[in-house]
Amino acid sequence: MTRTPAATGVRPKSLARAPGDEHDRPVHPEVRTSAGSVRGTTEHGVSAFRGIPFAEPPVGALRFAAPRPVRAWDGVREATTFGPPPPQAGVFGMDALSEDAGDDWLTVNVWSPDPGPSAGLPVMVWIQGGAYTIGTGSLPEYDGVRLARHGVVVVTFNYRVGLEGFAQVDGAPANRGLLDQVAALEWVRDNITAFGGDPDLVTVFGQSAGGGSVAALFGMPRARGLFRRAIVQSAPGTFFTPELAADIAAACAAELGFRPTVADLSTVAPALLPAASDAVTADITRWAPRWGQAAPRSILFSPVVDGEVLVTTPWRALAEGAGRDVDLLAGHTRDEQRLLTALDGQLGQVTEEQAATALATFAPDPDRYREAFPSAEQQYEVVLSDWLFRMPTYHLAVAQEAAGGRVHLYELTWPAPGMGGALGACHGLDVPLVFGNLTSGQPAALLDGSPEAEDVSSAMRTAWTAFATHGDPGWPVYDATRRPTRLFDVRSTVTTYPEETSREIWREHTFGPLPLVLPGSP
Protein backbone atom coordinates (compact mmCIF):
# COMPACT_ATOMS: atom_id res chain seq x y z
CA MET A 1 0.00 0.00 0.00
CA THR A 2 1.05 3.59 -0.56
CA ARG A 3 2.89 5.07 2.42
CA THR A 4 1.32 8.42 3.23
CA PRO A 5 2.74 11.15 5.48
CA ALA A 6 0.43 9.94 8.24
CA ALA A 7 1.76 6.40 7.84
CA THR A 8 5.26 7.60 8.62
CA GLY A 9 4.13 9.39 11.75
CA VAL A 10 4.22 12.89 10.23
CA ARG A 11 1.22 14.97 11.25
CA PRO A 12 -0.80 16.05 8.20
CA LYS A 13 -0.71 19.80 7.55
CA SER A 14 -4.47 19.97 7.79
CA LEU A 15 -4.23 19.21 11.49
CA ALA A 16 -1.97 22.16 12.27
CA ARG A 17 -4.95 23.51 14.18
CA ALA A 18 -6.48 21.43 16.95
CA PRO A 19 -9.12 18.94 15.75
CA GLY A 20 -11.70 20.56 17.99
CA ASP A 21 -11.42 24.05 16.54
CA GLU A 22 -14.71 25.45 15.23
CA HIS A 23 -12.96 27.99 12.99
CA ASP A 24 -14.17 27.88 9.38
CA ARG A 25 -16.16 24.71 10.02
CA PRO A 26 -19.73 24.62 8.65
CA VAL A 27 -22.50 23.69 11.05
CA HIS A 28 -24.03 21.39 8.43
CA PRO A 29 -21.09 20.01 6.41
CA GLU A 30 -21.80 18.39 3.05
CA VAL A 31 -19.77 15.60 1.50
CA ARG A 32 -20.10 13.92 -1.88
CA THR A 33 -20.00 10.11 -1.78
CA SER A 34 -19.95 7.73 -4.74
CA ALA A 35 -23.74 7.34 -4.45
CA GLY A 36 -24.65 10.97 -3.76
CA SER A 37 -24.19 13.92 -1.43
CA VAL A 38 -24.84 13.79 2.32
CA ARG A 39 -25.32 16.55 4.88
CA GLY A 40 -24.20 16.03 8.48
CA THR A 41 -23.82 18.06 11.67
CA THR A 42 -21.00 19.53 13.73
CA GLU A 43 -20.70 18.39 17.34
CA HIS A 44 -17.95 19.57 19.71
CA GLY A 45 -15.80 20.54 16.77
CA VAL A 46 -16.22 17.21 14.97
CA SER A 47 -18.24 16.70 11.80
CA ALA A 48 -20.68 13.81 12.20
CA PHE A 49 -22.53 11.96 9.44
CA ARG A 50 -25.02 9.25 10.39
CA GLY A 51 -27.06 6.63 8.57
CA ILE A 52 -25.31 6.65 5.18
CA PRO A 53 -26.25 3.52 3.21
CA PHE A 54 -23.32 1.40 2.08
CA ALA A 55 -25.48 -1.36 0.56
CA GLU A 56 -29.04 -1.95 -0.51
CA PRO A 57 -31.48 -3.10 2.21
CA PRO A 58 -31.10 -6.92 2.41
CA VAL A 59 -34.81 -7.63 2.27
CA GLY A 60 -37.28 -8.82 -0.34
CA ALA A 61 -35.43 -10.34 -3.27
CA LEU A 62 -32.11 -9.58 -1.50
CA ARG A 63 -33.00 -11.42 1.71
CA PHE A 64 -30.12 -13.67 2.82
CA ALA A 65 -28.06 -12.52 -0.17
CA ALA A 66 -24.58 -11.04 -0.17
CA PRO A 67 -24.74 -7.23 0.17
CA ARG A 68 -25.41 -5.33 -3.04
CA PRO A 69 -24.01 -1.86 -3.82
CA VAL A 70 -26.34 0.96 -2.84
CA ARG A 71 -28.15 2.77 -5.63
CA ALA A 72 -27.36 6.42 -6.24
CA TRP A 73 -29.70 9.15 -5.06
CA ASP A 74 -30.43 12.66 -6.31
CA GLY A 75 -29.96 15.80 -4.29
CA VAL A 76 -28.50 15.95 -0.80
CA ARG A 77 -29.37 13.21 1.66
CA GLU A 78 -29.69 14.21 5.31
CA ALA A 79 -27.17 12.22 7.38
CA THR A 80 -28.16 13.39 10.84
CA THR A 81 -29.85 10.29 12.26
CA PHE A 82 -28.69 6.70 12.57
CA GLY A 83 -30.03 4.02 10.28
CA PRO A 84 -32.23 1.29 11.78
CA PRO A 85 -30.44 -1.66 13.38
CA PRO A 86 -30.79 -5.15 11.92
CA PRO A 87 -33.14 -7.54 13.75
CA GLN A 88 -31.84 -8.17 17.26
CA ALA A 89 -32.11 -10.95 19.83
CA GLY A 90 -33.81 -10.15 23.13
CA VAL A 91 -30.60 -9.83 25.18
CA PHE A 92 -30.44 -6.58 27.19
CA GLY A 93 -33.70 -5.49 25.53
CA MET A 94 -31.97 -5.04 22.19
CA ASP A 95 -34.95 -6.46 20.28
CA ALA A 96 -36.92 -3.29 21.11
CA LEU A 97 -34.42 -1.19 19.11
CA SER A 98 -35.34 -2.83 15.83
CA GLU A 99 -39.12 -2.93 16.26
CA ASP A 100 -40.81 -1.02 13.40
CA ALA A 101 -37.47 0.67 12.68
CA GLY A 102 -37.31 0.05 8.94
CA ASP A 103 -35.19 -2.25 6.81
CA ASP A 104 -32.33 -0.01 5.65
CA TRP A 105 -30.05 -1.88 8.03
CA LEU A 106 -26.71 -1.52 6.23
CA THR A 107 -25.53 2.02 6.99
CA VAL A 108 -22.31 3.68 8.13
CA ASN A 109 -21.63 6.58 10.48
CA VAL A 110 -18.59 8.85 10.20
CA TRP A 111 -16.99 11.29 12.66
CA SER A 112 -14.24 13.48 11.22
CA PRO A 113 -12.22 16.25 12.88
CA ASP A 114 -11.27 17.72 9.50
CA PRO A 115 -13.51 16.69 6.59
CA GLY A 116 -12.20 17.37 3.13
CA PRO A 117 -10.22 15.48 0.52
CA SER A 118 -6.85 17.01 1.46
CA ALA A 119 -6.77 16.05 5.16
CA GLY A 120 -5.34 12.53 4.78
CA LEU A 121 -6.17 11.43 8.34
CA PRO A 122 -5.86 7.92 9.76
CA VAL A 123 -9.16 6.03 9.69
CA MET A 124 -10.48 3.78 12.47
CA VAL A 125 -13.34 1.46 11.49
CA TRP A 126 -15.16 -0.08 14.45
CA ILE A 127 -16.88 -3.49 14.40
CA GLN A 128 -19.13 -3.84 17.43
CA GLY A 129 -19.60 -7.00 19.45
CA GLY A 130 -22.71 -8.73 20.71
CA ALA A 131 -22.16 -12.51 20.45
CA TYR A 132 -22.99 -12.29 16.73
CA THR A 133 -26.67 -11.98 17.77
CA ILE A 134 -27.04 -8.33 18.74
CA GLY A 135 -25.29 -5.08 17.94
CA THR A 136 -25.58 -1.83 16.06
CA GLY A 137 -23.16 1.00 15.38
CA SER A 138 -25.63 3.55 16.75
CA LEU A 139 -25.27 2.67 20.45
CA PRO A 140 -24.19 5.67 22.55
CA GLU A 141 -21.09 3.87 23.80
CA TYR A 142 -19.76 3.93 20.21
CA ASP A 143 -20.16 7.67 19.67
CA GLY A 144 -16.96 8.67 17.85
CA VAL A 145 -16.55 12.31 18.92
CA ARG A 146 -13.95 11.88 21.67
CA LEU A 147 -11.87 9.41 19.68
CA ALA A 148 -12.02 11.59 16.55
CA ARG A 149 -10.69 14.55 18.52
CA HIS A 150 -7.37 12.67 18.65
CA GLY A 151 -6.98 13.38 14.92
CA VAL A 152 -8.56 10.29 13.35
CA VAL A 153 -11.67 9.65 11.28
CA VAL A 154 -13.95 7.19 13.11
CA VAL A 155 -16.41 4.92 11.29
CA THR A 156 -19.06 2.65 12.78
CA PHE A 157 -21.62 0.61 10.84
CA ASN A 158 -24.31 -2.05 11.04
CA TYR A 159 -23.98 -5.63 9.89
CA ARG A 160 -26.49 -8.47 9.93
CA VAL A 161 -26.45 -10.62 13.07
CA GLY A 162 -28.15 -13.81 14.24
CA LEU A 163 -30.03 -15.88 11.67
CA GLU A 164 -29.96 -13.07 9.11
CA GLY A 165 -26.18 -12.74 9.25
CA PHE A 166 -24.61 -15.98 10.44
CA ALA A 167 -27.02 -18.92 10.13
CA GLN A 168 -26.09 -21.63 7.64
CA VAL A 169 -29.05 -21.27 5.27
CA ASP A 170 -29.42 -23.44 2.18
CA GLY A 171 -29.31 -21.31 -0.96
CA ALA A 172 -27.52 -18.40 0.76
CA PRO A 173 -23.83 -17.54 1.07
CA ALA A 174 -22.29 -18.30 4.44
CA ASN A 175 -21.17 -15.53 6.78
CA ARG A 176 -23.40 -12.80 5.41
CA GLY A 177 -22.56 -10.67 8.44
CA LEU A 178 -18.87 -10.88 7.54
CA LEU A 179 -19.68 -10.03 3.92
CA ASP A 180 -21.50 -6.93 5.21
CA GLN A 181 -18.32 -5.97 7.05
CA VAL A 182 -16.25 -6.34 3.87
CA ALA A 183 -18.81 -4.22 1.99
CA ALA A 184 -18.51 -1.50 4.67
CA LEU A 185 -14.72 -1.57 4.34
CA GLU A 186 -15.06 -1.29 0.56
CA TRP A 187 -17.28 1.74 1.10
CA VAL A 188 -14.56 3.22 3.30
CA ARG A 189 -11.95 2.55 0.62
CA ASP A 190 -14.05 4.27 -2.04
CA ASN A 191 -15.42 7.20 -0.03
CA ILE A 192 -13.41 8.05 3.06
CA THR A 193 -11.12 10.54 1.28
CA ALA A 194 -14.07 12.90 0.96
CA PHE A 195 -14.49 12.80 4.76
CA GLY A 196 -10.84 13.63 5.43
CA GLY A 197 -9.57 10.06 5.71
CA ASP A 198 -6.71 8.24 4.03
CA PRO A 199 -7.96 4.98 2.42
CA ASP A 200 -4.41 3.59 2.60
CA LEU A 201 -4.31 4.13 6.36
CA VAL A 202 -7.32 2.20 7.65
CA THR A 203 -7.31 0.46 11.03
CA VAL A 204 -10.15 -1.95 11.69
CA PHE A 205 -10.87 -2.52 15.38
CA GLY A 206 -13.46 -4.41 17.37
CA GLN A 207 -14.30 -6.01 20.69
CA SER A 208 -15.79 -9.42 21.61
CA ALA A 209 -17.68 -10.65 18.52
CA GLY A 210 -16.34 -7.51 16.85
CA GLY A 211 -12.82 -8.63 17.74
CA GLY A 212 -13.64 -12.09 16.41
CA SER A 213 -14.85 -10.44 13.22
CA VAL A 214 -11.61 -8.47 12.88
CA ALA A 215 -9.71 -11.73 13.33
CA ALA A 216 -11.94 -13.46 10.79
CA LEU A 217 -11.04 -10.86 8.15
CA PHE A 218 -7.54 -12.37 8.04
CA GLY A 219 -9.10 -15.61 6.78
CA MET A 220 -11.18 -13.90 4.08
CA PRO A 221 -9.58 -13.38 0.66
CA ARG A 222 -12.20 -10.68 -0.09
CA ALA A 223 -10.90 -8.55 2.79
CA ARG A 224 -7.28 -8.41 1.70
CA GLY A 225 -5.98 -4.93 1.06
CA LEU A 226 -8.90 -3.20 2.78
CA PHE A 227 -7.03 -2.34 6.00
CA ARG A 228 -3.47 -1.54 7.00
CA ARG A 229 -3.77 -2.21 10.71
CA ALA A 230 -6.02 -4.20 13.01
CA ILE A 231 -6.91 -4.05 16.71
CA VAL A 232 -8.42 -7.17 18.27
CA GLN A 233 -10.02 -6.71 21.69
CA SER A 234 -11.12 -9.89 23.52
CA ALA A 235 -11.78 -12.03 20.46
CA PRO A 236 -13.89 -15.15 21.15
CA GLY A 237 -12.40 -18.42 19.98
CA THR A 238 -15.67 -19.75 18.60
CA PHE A 239 -15.68 -20.53 14.90
CA PHE A 240 -18.08 -23.16 13.55
CA THR A 241 -17.87 -25.99 11.07
CA PRO A 242 -20.61 -25.88 8.42
CA GLU A 243 -22.16 -29.02 9.93
CA LEU A 244 -22.56 -27.47 13.38
CA ALA A 245 -23.86 -24.20 11.94
CA ALA A 246 -26.39 -26.08 9.77
CA ASP A 247 -27.66 -28.12 12.71
CA ILE A 248 -28.20 -24.99 14.82
CA ALA A 249 -29.94 -23.26 11.91
CA ALA A 250 -32.26 -26.25 11.50
CA ALA A 251 -33.21 -26.10 15.18
CA CYS A 252 -33.98 -22.39 14.95
CA ALA A 253 -36.01 -22.77 11.75
CA ALA A 254 -37.97 -25.64 13.31
CA GLU A 255 -39.18 -23.28 16.02
CA LEU A 256 -41.11 -21.53 13.24
CA GLY A 257 -42.15 -24.73 11.49
CA PHE A 258 -39.74 -24.22 8.59
CA ARG A 259 -36.56 -25.62 7.09
CA PRO A 260 -33.32 -23.60 7.07
CA THR A 261 -33.62 -22.59 3.42
CA VAL A 262 -33.89 -19.26 1.66
CA ALA A 263 -37.21 -20.33 0.19
CA ASP A 264 -38.68 -20.93 3.65
CA LEU A 265 -37.05 -18.31 5.83
CA SER A 266 -37.43 -15.45 3.38
CA THR A 267 -41.19 -15.69 3.94
CA VAL A 268 -40.74 -15.03 7.67
CA ALA A 269 -40.89 -11.45 8.93
CA PRO A 270 -37.36 -10.44 9.97
CA ALA A 271 -38.43 -9.60 13.52
CA LEU A 272 -39.57 -13.19 14.10
CA LEU A 273 -36.21 -14.83 13.44
CA PRO A 274 -34.44 -13.55 16.57
CA ALA A 275 -37.38 -14.78 18.64
CA ALA A 276 -36.83 -18.26 17.22
CA SER A 277 -33.17 -18.27 18.20
CA ASP A 278 -34.08 -16.89 21.65
CA ALA A 279 -36.44 -19.87 22.09
CA VAL A 280 -33.65 -22.29 21.21
CA THR A 281 -31.30 -20.56 23.65
CA ALA A 282 -33.89 -20.91 26.41
CA ASP A 283 -33.90 -24.69 25.85
CA ILE A 284 -30.19 -25.02 25.13
CA THR A 285 -29.55 -28.05 27.40
CA ARG A 286 -31.60 -30.13 24.99
CA TRP A 287 -28.90 -29.66 22.38
CA ALA A 288 -25.82 -30.02 24.57
CA PRO A 289 -24.79 -33.50 23.33
CA ARG A 290 -24.86 -32.43 19.67
CA TRP A 291 -23.48 -28.91 19.88
CA GLY A 292 -20.56 -29.66 22.17
CA GLN A 293 -18.80 -26.71 23.79
CA ALA A 294 -21.08 -24.16 22.10
CA ALA A 295 -24.17 -25.34 24.00
CA PRO A 296 -23.17 -24.72 27.64
CA ARG A 297 -22.11 -21.18 26.70
CA SER A 298 -25.38 -20.60 24.76
CA ILE A 299 -23.46 -19.76 21.58
CA LEU A 300 -25.73 -20.21 18.57
CA PHE A 301 -23.89 -18.09 16.01
CA SER A 302 -20.26 -17.64 15.05
CA PRO A 303 -18.30 -17.24 11.82
CA VAL A 304 -18.46 -20.44 9.76
CA VAL A 305 -15.28 -21.82 8.23
CA ASP A 306 -17.02 -22.66 4.98
CA GLY A 307 -13.91 -22.75 2.76
CA GLU A 308 -15.16 -20.02 0.44
CA VAL A 309 -16.13 -16.82 2.25
CA LEU A 310 -14.05 -17.74 5.30
CA VAL A 311 -11.42 -20.15 4.04
CA THR A 312 -9.73 -20.90 7.37
CA THR A 313 -9.55 -19.89 11.01
CA PRO A 314 -7.73 -16.64 11.87
CA TRP A 315 -5.04 -18.51 13.81
CA ARG A 316 -4.16 -20.62 10.81
CA ALA A 317 -4.42 -17.65 8.46
CA LEU A 318 -1.99 -15.62 10.57
CA ALA A 319 0.35 -18.59 10.97
CA GLU A 320 0.44 -18.85 7.17
CA GLY A 321 1.41 -15.19 6.84
CA ALA A 322 -1.91 -13.45 6.17
CA GLY A 323 -0.94 -10.66 8.57
CA ARG A 324 2.65 -10.01 7.53
CA ASP A 325 1.66 -6.74 5.84
CA VAL A 326 -0.80 -5.74 8.58
CA ASP A 327 0.22 -4.30 11.96
CA LEU A 328 -1.72 -6.00 14.75
CA LEU A 329 -2.61 -4.85 18.26
CA ALA A 330 -4.25 -7.58 20.34
CA GLY A 331 -5.26 -8.00 23.95
CA HIS A 332 -7.90 -8.86 26.50
CA THR A 333 -9.11 -7.98 29.97
CA ARG A 334 -7.80 -9.82 33.01
CA ASP A 335 -11.16 -11.00 34.35
CA GLU A 336 -13.12 -11.66 31.15
CA GLN A 337 -15.63 -14.10 32.66
CA ARG A 338 -16.51 -12.12 35.79
CA LEU A 339 -19.28 -10.02 34.22
CA LEU A 340 -20.80 -13.08 32.53
CA THR A 341 -20.82 -14.93 35.85
CA ALA A 342 -22.57 -11.96 37.45
CA LEU A 343 -25.17 -11.84 34.67
CA ASP A 344 -25.83 -15.54 35.31
CA GLY A 345 -26.42 -14.77 39.00
CA GLN A 346 -23.50 -16.96 40.06
CA LEU A 347 -20.96 -14.42 41.28
CA GLY A 348 -19.59 -15.75 44.58
CA GLN A 349 -21.81 -18.82 44.32
CA VAL A 350 -19.89 -21.17 42.02
CA THR A 351 -19.97 -24.73 43.37
CA GLU A 352 -17.33 -27.44 43.21
CA GLU A 353 -19.59 -29.34 40.81
CA GLN A 354 -19.92 -26.35 38.46
CA ALA A 355 -16.17 -25.82 38.47
CA ALA A 356 -15.54 -29.50 37.78
CA THR A 357 -17.97 -29.43 34.86
CA ALA A 358 -16.36 -26.31 33.39
CA LEU A 359 -12.89 -27.85 33.66
CA ALA A 360 -14.00 -31.15 32.11
CA THR A 361 -15.72 -29.32 29.25
CA PHE A 362 -13.24 -26.57 28.40
CA ALA A 363 -9.80 -27.16 29.93
CA PRO A 364 -6.98 -28.81 27.95
CA ASP A 365 -5.66 -30.09 31.29
CA PRO A 366 -8.12 -29.86 34.21
CA ASP A 367 -5.59 -31.04 36.79
CA ARG A 368 -3.24 -28.15 36.06
CA TYR A 369 -6.06 -25.68 36.71
CA ARG A 370 -6.80 -27.40 40.03
CA GLU A 371 -3.15 -27.21 41.02
CA ALA A 372 -2.81 -23.53 40.12
CA PHE A 373 -6.16 -22.20 41.35
CA PRO A 374 -7.32 -23.57 44.71
CA SER A 375 -10.94 -22.40 44.82
CA ALA A 376 -13.86 -23.52 42.70
CA GLU A 377 -14.64 -19.88 41.86
CA GLN A 378 -11.12 -19.30 40.54
CA GLN A 379 -11.10 -22.48 38.48
CA TYR A 380 -14.47 -21.64 36.94
CA GLU A 381 -13.61 -18.01 36.23
CA VAL A 382 -10.17 -18.60 34.80
CA VAL A 383 -10.92 -21.57 32.56
CA LEU A 384 -13.94 -19.85 31.02
CA SER A 385 -11.99 -16.61 30.56
CA ASP A 386 -9.20 -18.58 28.91
CA TRP A 387 -11.36 -20.72 26.63
CA LEU A 388 -13.62 -18.02 25.29
CA PHE A 389 -11.47 -14.86 25.18
CA ARG A 390 -8.02 -14.75 26.71
CA MET A 391 -6.22 -17.63 25.05
CA PRO A 392 -7.83 -17.21 21.60
CA THR A 393 -6.70 -13.57 21.61
CA TYR A 394 -3.25 -14.37 22.94
CA HIS A 395 -2.78 -17.11 20.33
CA LEU A 396 -3.52 -14.59 17.58
CA ALA A 397 -0.51 -12.61 18.77
CA VAL A 398 1.61 -15.76 18.93
CA ALA A 399 0.63 -16.77 15.37
CA GLN A 400 1.31 -13.28 14.01
CA GLU A 401 4.77 -13.10 15.59
CA ALA A 402 5.73 -16.63 14.55
CA ALA A 403 4.93 -15.84 10.91
CA GLY A 404 7.09 -12.72 10.91
CA GLY A 405 4.35 -10.13 11.40
CA ARG A 406 4.30 -7.19 13.82
CA VAL A 407 2.07 -7.41 16.86
CA HIS A 408 1.72 -5.48 20.12
CA LEU A 409 0.10 -7.21 23.11
CA TYR A 410 -1.84 -5.69 26.01
CA GLU A 411 -4.01 -6.62 28.98
CA LEU A 412 -6.51 -4.38 30.77
CA THR A 413 -5.99 -4.92 34.51
CA TRP A 414 -7.75 -1.85 35.96
CA PRO A 415 -10.70 -3.18 38.00
CA ALA A 416 -14.13 -1.78 37.21
CA PRO A 417 -15.45 0.14 40.23
CA GLY A 418 -19.04 -0.90 39.51
CA MET A 419 -20.69 -3.34 41.95
CA GLY A 420 -18.15 -2.42 44.58
CA GLY A 421 -15.25 -3.64 42.46
CA ALA A 422 -16.55 -7.21 42.37
CA LEU A 423 -16.38 -7.36 38.57
CA GLY A 424 -12.64 -6.75 38.29
CA ALA A 425 -11.26 -6.01 34.84
CA CYS A 426 -14.25 -7.64 33.22
CA HIS A 427 -15.40 -8.29 29.67
CA GLY A 428 -16.60 -5.11 27.95
CA LEU A 429 -14.81 -2.71 30.30
CA ASP A 430 -12.48 -1.68 27.48
CA VAL A 431 -15.29 -0.34 25.28
CA PRO A 432 -16.11 2.89 27.18
CA LEU A 433 -12.42 3.38 27.92
CA VAL A 434 -11.34 3.17 24.28
CA PHE A 435 -14.11 5.47 23.03
CA GLY A 436 -13.96 7.79 26.02
CA ASN A 437 -17.71 7.61 26.53
CA LEU A 438 -17.58 7.30 30.30
CA THR A 439 -21.12 8.38 31.17
CA SER A 440 -23.26 7.19 28.24
CA GLY A 441 -24.33 3.73 27.13
CA GLN A 442 -24.80 0.56 29.16
CA PRO A 443 -21.05 -0.19 29.68
CA ALA A 444 -20.63 3.16 31.45
CA ALA A 445 -22.36 1.56 34.46
CA LEU A 446 -19.19 -0.47 34.98
CA LEU A 447 -17.27 2.75 35.65
CA ASP A 448 -19.58 4.06 38.37
CA GLY A 449 -18.37 7.62 37.86
CA SER A 450 -14.81 6.77 38.91
CA PRO A 451 -12.32 9.64 38.42
CA GLU A 452 -9.65 7.03 37.64
CA ALA A 453 -11.58 6.02 34.52
CA GLU A 454 -10.58 9.20 32.70
CA ASP A 455 -6.88 8.50 33.23
CA VAL A 456 -7.12 4.90 32.01
CA SER A 457 -9.33 5.98 29.12
CA SER A 458 -6.89 8.69 28.06
CA ALA A 459 -4.04 6.18 28.04
CA MET A 460 -5.98 3.70 25.92
CA ARG A 461 -7.29 6.32 23.47
CA THR A 462 -3.78 7.69 23.05
CA ALA A 463 -2.37 4.21 22.39
CA TRP A 464 -5.13 3.20 19.97
CA THR A 465 -4.93 6.38 17.90
CA ALA A 466 -1.10 6.36 17.90
CA PHE A 467 -1.21 2.80 16.60
CA ALA A 468 -3.70 3.81 13.91
CA THR A 469 -1.48 6.73 12.91
CA HIS A 470 1.96 5.16 12.72
CA GLY A 471 1.72 1.56 13.96
CA ASP A 472 3.36 2.15 17.35
CA PRO A 473 1.05 2.26 20.42
CA GLY A 474 3.93 3.14 22.72
CA TRP A 475 5.48 -0.13 23.86
CA PRO A 476 7.71 -2.80 22.26
CA VAL A 477 6.48 -5.29 19.70
CA TYR A 478 5.75 -8.77 21.00
CA ASP A 479 8.42 -11.44 20.71
CA ALA A 480 8.28 -15.04 21.88
CA THR A 481 11.24 -14.70 24.26
CA ARG A 482 10.47 -11.54 26.28
CA ARG A 483 6.70 -11.43 25.62
CA PRO A 484 6.35 -7.67 26.41
CA THR A 485 2.81 -6.71 27.35
CA ARG A 486 1.30 -3.33 28.20
CA LEU A 487 -0.85 -3.54 31.32
CA PHE A 488 -3.45 -0.77 31.39
CA ASP A 489 -4.16 0.38 34.94
CA VAL A 490 -4.09 3.60 36.92
CA ARG A 491 -0.32 3.24 36.67
CA SER A 492 0.27 1.39 33.41
CA THR A 493 3.37 -0.75 33.04
CA VAL A 494 5.06 -2.96 30.47
CA THR A 495 5.94 -6.43 31.70
CA THR A 496 6.17 -10.04 30.56
CA TYR A 497 2.76 -11.45 29.61
CA PRO A 498 1.24 -11.98 33.06
CA GLU A 499 -1.04 -14.98 32.48
CA GLU A 500 1.84 -17.45 32.59
CA THR A 501 -0.10 -20.38 34.04
CA SER A 502 -2.77 -20.16 31.37
CA ARG A 503 -0.19 -19.63 28.66
CA GLU A 504 1.57 -22.86 29.62
CA ILE A 505 -1.63 -24.88 29.89
CA TRP A 506 -2.78 -23.77 26.43
CA ARG A 507 0.64 -23.74 24.77
CA GLU A 508 0.00 -26.74 22.52
CA HIS A 509 -3.72 -26.15 21.98
CA THR A 510 -5.00 -25.52 18.47
CA PHE A 511 -8.13 -23.41 18.06
CA GLY A 512 -10.08 -25.10 15.30
CA PRO A 513 -13.70 -24.73 14.20
CA LEU A 514 -16.16 -26.29 16.65
CA PRO A 515 -17.70 -29.49 15.24
CA LEU A 516 -21.11 -31.10 15.34
CA VAL A 517 -20.91 -33.99 17.82
CA LEU A 518 -22.69 -37.01 16.38
CA PRO A 519 -23.50 -40.23 18.28
CA GLY A 520 -20.38 -42.35 18.56
CA SER A 521 -18.03 -39.39 18.06
CA PRO A 522 -14.96 -39.37 20.31
Image: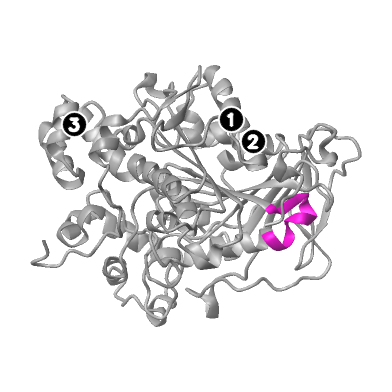
According to the image, label 2 marks what residue?
466
According to the image, label 3 marks what residue?
350
Amino acid residing under circle 3: Val
Q: Who's the residue at 80% across and 41% down the image?
A: 12
According to the image, label 1 marks what residue?
474
Q: Who's the residue at 54% across and 73% down the image?
A: 59
Could you tell me how far apart the alpha carbons at marks 1 and 3 are, in whole angstroms? 39 Å
Write down the quadrant of residue 412 in the picture: top left
Q: How is the image coloured?
A: one colour
Residue 229 x, y percent position in the rendering: 58, 48
Could you tell me how far apart the alpha carbons at marks 2 and 1 are, in whole angstroms? 8 Å
Residue 245 x, y percent position in the rendering: 31, 66
Residue 333 x, y percent position in the rendering: 41, 33
Residue 317 on the magenta segment: no
Cβ–Cβ under 8 Å for marks 1 and 3: no
Could you tell me how far apart the alpha carbons at marks 3 and 2 are, in whole angstroms? 41 Å
Q: Which residues are magenta?
A: 189-200
Tell which tag, 2 or 1, sits nearer the viewer: 1
Tell which tag, 3 or 2, sits nearer the viewer: 2
Amino acid residing under circle 2: Ala
Q: Which one is nearer the viewer's eye here, 75 or 501?
A: 501
Cβ–Cβ under 8 Å for marks 2 and 1: yes
Q: Who's the residue at 29% across and 75% down the image?
A: 257
379 left or right of 45 in image: left
Q: Which one is nearer the viewer's eye here, 227 or 150?
A: 227
249 left or right of 446 in image: left
For residue 406, above or below residue 463: below
Callout 1 secondary element: loop
